[in-house]
Image (cartoon, rainbow, N blue to C red):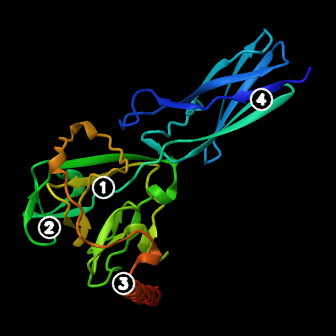
C-alpha cells in the first residue's frame, strides 16, 4: 500500500535557553509527523537553512503509521555552532521522507527590527569620543543640538548572520567623508534601519547605499553585536561626528539581549519621536541629499583611482 497522508505540523523553534541571551548555541526545531499505509520503516526529518546547510534526524517505527509522531532536530548537530543570536526572518525548509512518499513544510523565524551601532563606533561625550560599547547608564553624551544628556540604557543585540536576512542585519558602512562636509569623520558602521539626520531629514542607513562609498559590509563576523543608546528623550547623538538618532521605544519589536536590564518607562513618560521627516528607502531621500552624496562618491572614486 502506498504511503498517504504524510504531513508535518508547524515546526516550533526553541533554543537551549532563551533567544534573548547571547550565550545560546543551539536552535532546535520540533513538530509532529503523521502518515498512513506503512507498517514499519524510518522517517528522515531534514532541515535545510537558508544557506543550504542541512541537518537530518531519523526515527523508526514498527506499527502502522496512523498516528502522530514527535520529531525534533538540533540545527547545529553537525558540529557547526553558528547560532549565538536570534534568527531573524529566516526560512527553514523541513522535509520528511519515508519509503513511498515525502512531504515538505516551510517555516519562517520571527522578524524583528535591528536599529543599532556597530561595536567601536565613537560617540561624542563631554570628555571626548568614546566607543559605544564602552558607554554605561549615567554616562553623559553630547547631542547635536547642544546639551549633554545622561545615558538611560545601553541595549545590546547579538546577530547571527547565518540565520538572518542580510539586508536586515548586515551593517551599512558609510566611508569617511561620504556624506559631505567631512562626515563621518571615520568609517561609520550601523544597522540598515538606523537613521542619521541629514539636512533635517532622518534617513535610514539602507536608503543611502550606493554600492561604492556607502555599502552593506559582508566582511563582519558571522556572530556580532550591535549597541544602541537610550536617552530620556529621542535625540540626535554624534556618532563619528554625524548626528544619529538615539533609541526610541516603539510598537515594532526590537529584541535585545539585555532587555531585562532596562528600566521600563511609565505610560506618561514614553519618549516622543523627533518631529523630523523620515526617509526609509532610497526613493524617499531628498534629491539634494542624493546629488551631494553622488558628487562626493564621484570625487572619492576619482581620487582613489588617481592614487592607485
Residue located beneath label 3 in the image: 289
**How many neighbours does mark 3 have within 10 angstroms: few (below 14), some (14-19), or many (20 or more)?**
some
Instruction: Please state if 43 lies on the left or on the right of 3 as rendered.
Output: left
Task: Report, in whole angstroms, how far the alpha carbon at label 4 lies from the one at label 3.
Answer: 55 Å
Instruction: Please state if 308 lies on the left or on the right of 37 as rendered.
Output: left
Helix, strand or loop for disc 4: strand
Q: Of label 1 and label 3, which has the lower sequence position?
A: 1
Q: Disc 2 vs disc 4: Cβ atoms closer than 8 Å? A: no
Task: Report, in whole angstroms, how far the alpha carbon at label 1 lies from the one at label 3.
Answer: 27 Å
Horizontal and vertical percent position of residue 20: 36, 37
Is there any visible trace of residue 280 in the rendered image? yes
Residue located beneath label 4 in the image: 97
Helix, strand or loop for disc 1: loop
Task: Report, in whole angstroms, how far the alpha carbon at label 2 lies from the one at label 3.
Answer: 22 Å
Residue located beneath label 2 in the image: 143
Q: Nearer the viewer, mark 4 or mark 1?
A: 4
Q: Would you place residue 206 above or below residue 94 in this image?
A: below
Q: Of label 4 and label 1, which has the lower sequence position?
A: 4
Amino acid at each position: 500500500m502506498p504511503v498517504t497522508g504524510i504531513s508535518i505540523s508547524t515546526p516550533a523553534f526553541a533554543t537551549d535557553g532563551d533567544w534573548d541571551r547571547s550565550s545560546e548555541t543551539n536552535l532546535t526545531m520540533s513538530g509532529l509527523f503523521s502518515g498512513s499505509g506503512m507498517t514499519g520503516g524510518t522517517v528522515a526529518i531534514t532541515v535545510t537553512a537558508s544557506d543550504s546547510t542541512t541537518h537530518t534526524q531519523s526515527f523508526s517505527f514498527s506499527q502502522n503509521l496512523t498516528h502522530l509522531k514527535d520529531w525534533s532536530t538540533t540545527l547545529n548537530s553537525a558540529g557547526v555552532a553558528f547560532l549565538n543570536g536570534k534568527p531573524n526572518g529566516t526560512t527553514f525548509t523541513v522535509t520528511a521522507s519515508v519509503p513511498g512518499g515525502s512531504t515538505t513544510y516551510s517555516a519562517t523565524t520571527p522578524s524583528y527590527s535591528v536599529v543599532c551601532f556597530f561595536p567601536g563606533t565613537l560617540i561624542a561625550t563631554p570628555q571626548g569620543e568614546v566607543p559605544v560599547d564602552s558607554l554605561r547608564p549615567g554616562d553623559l553624551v553630547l547631542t547635536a543640538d547642544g546639551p549633554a544628556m545622561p545615558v538611560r540604557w545601553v541595549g545590546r543585540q547579538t546577530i547571527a548572520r547565518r540565520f538572518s536576512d542580510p539586508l536586515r542585519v548586515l551593517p551599512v558602512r558609510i566611508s569617511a567623508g561620504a556624506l559631505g562636509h567631512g562626515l563621518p569623520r571615520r568609517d561609520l558602521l550601523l544597522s540598515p534601519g538606523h537613521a542619521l539626520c541629514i539636512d533635517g531629514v532622518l534617513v535610514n542607513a539602507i536608503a543611502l547605499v550606493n554600492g561604492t562609498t556607502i555599502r552593506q559590509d559582508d566582511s563582519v563576523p558571522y556572530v556580532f553585536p550591535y549597541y544602541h543608546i537610550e536617552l530620556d528623550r529621542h535625540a540626535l547623538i554624534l556618532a563619528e561626528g554625524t548626528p544619529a538618532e538615539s533609541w526610541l521605544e516603539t510598537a515594532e519589536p526590537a529584541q535585545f539581549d539585555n532587555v531585562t536590564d532596562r528600566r521600563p518607562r511609565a505610560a506618561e513618560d514614553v519618549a516622543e519621536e523627533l518631529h523630523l521627516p523620515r526617509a526609509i528607502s532610497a526613493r524617499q531621500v531628498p534629491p539634494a541629499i542624493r546629488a551631494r552624496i553622488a558628487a562626493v562618491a564621484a570625487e572619492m572614486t576619482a581620487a582613489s583611482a588617481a592614487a592607485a
